[in-house]
Amino acid sequence: MRRLPRYGFHGHTEKLNGRLAMLGFIALVAVEFKLGHGLLIW
């Protein structure tokens, strides 16, 4: 039987984190496109 770690990287949480990161990146690109300039410019 395979032992699962108590903490650290799990398949489900890694997929969720990746999907949320992609969603955040797409939202950032959409906002920058709508405003006409980058949000990360000082």
Image (cartoon, rainbow, N blue to C red):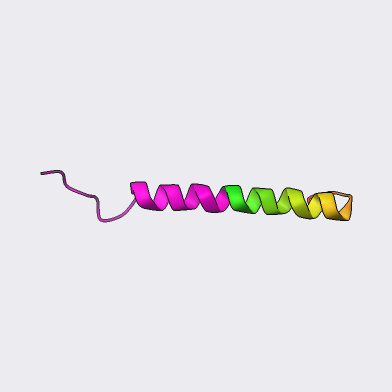
Pinpoint residue 6: horizontal percent, then vertical percent: 25, 56
Looking at the image, which residue is at 45% across and 53% down? Answer: 16
Pinpoint residue 19: horizontal percent, then vertical percent: 52, 49
- Report the side of 28 relative to 5 (left or right): right
Q: Is residue 9 visible?
A: no
Q: Is residue 6 visible?
A: yes
Pinpoint residue 26: horizontal percent, then vertical percent: 67, 49
Q: How many marks?
A: 0
Looking at the image, which residue is at 84% across and 54% down? Answer: 34
Looking at the image, which residue is at 24% across and 50% down? Answer: 5
- Report the side of 15 relative to 41 (left or right): left
Pinpoint residue 24: horizontal percent, then vertical percent: 63, 53
Examine the image and state in which quarter residue 2 appears. top left
Looking at the image, which residue is at 48% across and 51% down? Answer: 17
Q: Residue furthest top?
A: 2
- Report the side of 3 relative to 8 (left or right): left
Magenta span contains residue 14: yes
Magenta span contains residue 20: yes
Image quadrant holding the N terminus, namely: top left
Instruction: Please give the range of residues in magenta.
Output: 1-21
Q: Residue furthest left?
A: 1
Nearer-the-camera pick, 33 or 39: 33
- Report the side of 20 relative to 39 (left or right): left
Q: Residue furthest right?
A: 36
